[in-house]
Image (cartoon, helix red, strand yellow):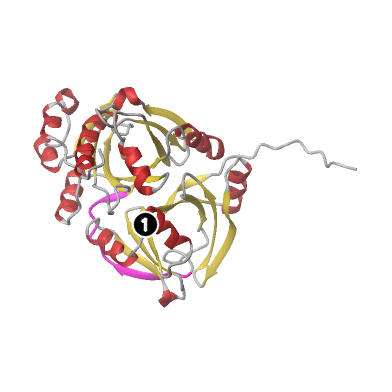
Amino acid sequence: MTDTLQTPVELGTPVLEGTDHVELWVGNARQAAHHYRNAFGFDVVAYAGPETGVRDRASYVLQQGKVRLVLTAPLTPDGPIAEHVRQHGDGVRAIALRVADARAAYEAATARGAHGVGEPVTVSDEDGALTFASVATFGDTVHHFVERDEYAGAHWPGYREERQNGRGVGLRFIDHTVGNVELGKMDDWVAFYSEVFGFNVFQEFDEKDIATKYSALRSKVARDPRSMITFPINEPAVGVAASQIQEYLDYYRGSGVQHIAVHTDDIVGTVDAMRQRGVEFLKAPRSYYEALGDRAEGIDEDLDRLEDLSVLIDRDDDGYLLQIFTRPVGDRPTLFFEVIQRKGCKGFGKGNFKALFEAIEREQAARGNL
Ligand code: FE2
């Protein structure tokens, strides 16, 4: 016998380069694409479906700045897409992560404890080859590792190029993507991102910071120190009545992506355009602006204009941020979007949560869920 006894080698964490795309599984991809194009300003850049030889689904790829959304609907009542939509309604199926080596990323992630749900495969067409693999994360959500350095096509083999201009509203890149998980599971999932992906974890807030009369949540943030991909994870805390996180979990039927925050360099222009195109945002109460005090001191924007648009303001030692949240984008009170502009501040709007929750709870009460 020779060298069969090997010293265990600590495998590194997957090396991530950024978010490749976010895929939503929806009931009607054509209409969803129309909505995200006309209301959110995304260009439609690629399509796959029966016309491209794909029999069981239709997918529209939308792009604005670096943000790429894939909207996929099932064409049959059977299979995982139809089942996902039946369970969850429209929601995020995959947060796809760009890597230089999908096989290495998959091997590293699974060796470190991730559950593999798709072995690495290479797919190709006349535009080149693309390799991807998939691991599970919270709920029915997955991460794809996407290696596309050798692929020059519009999106993916099997897709054809489309050119439908969405007249962009200034959305540039994903700032963070938030997961809601069940009570008691937040620490497990931030540990997952720490152990499997090597993310740093920091406390964002707990019950003491953001208890309103009804809603309370706990939140920790997991961030890749290399790519800066950021996943805050929320869990409900026990409040007087159902927390908004619990309402999400009830309607989504489990853990899933709560919101996608997209950065703009001009939140006033972006939100103004989105409002004119019919996007509905949560309304901040008048009292919120009256109570701002020195949090609004020294900001570049006109405070009256921010109040007109219901844009919220928060700050930390490094600067301030401006943010606003859409109403849920579907019928179920689940997925929504955030528009965010950072001016130095590295937080997530902790100071706004009480004001925000009071606004959310007014809507929750209107739905009879409070
Ligand atoms: Fe956020």
Side of 220 relative to 16 (left or right): left
Q: Is residue 175 visible?
A: no
Can residue 201 be seen in this snapshot? Answer: yes
The residue stretch that appears in magenta: 158-172
122 shown above or below 333: below
Is 163 in the magenta? yes
Tag 1: amino acid:
Leu
> Foreground residue, 78 or 120?
78
Closer to us: 236 or 354: 236
Q: Which residue is mark 1?
A: 69
Instruction: Indicate whether 123 appears above or below 370.
Output: below
Residue 91, how many percent across, how many down? 37, 53
Q: Quadrant of the C terminus?
A: top left
How far across and down, in percent of the image, does residue 83 sit? Answer: 44, 59
Q: What is the crowding at mark 1: few (fewer than 14 residues within 10 Å), some, or many (at least 20)?
A: many
**Ligand 1 - quadrant of the structure image:** top left
Residue shown at 17%/31% (left/top)? 299
SS at mark 1 in the image: strand
Q: Residue 35 sits in which quadrant?
A: bottom left
User: Residue pushed farthest left?
Assistant: 304
**Rendering coords of residue 81 (x, y %):** 44, 61
Residue 239 inside the magenta-drawn segment: no
Q: Position of residue 201 (x, y in %)?
A: 46, 31
Q: Relative to residue 277, is residue 312 depicted above or below?
A: above
Q: Furthest-right residue in view?
A: 1
- Image point 82% across, 38% down: which residue? 5
Q: In which quadrant will I find the N terminus?
A: top right
Q: Nearer the viewer, residue 301 or 292?
A: 292
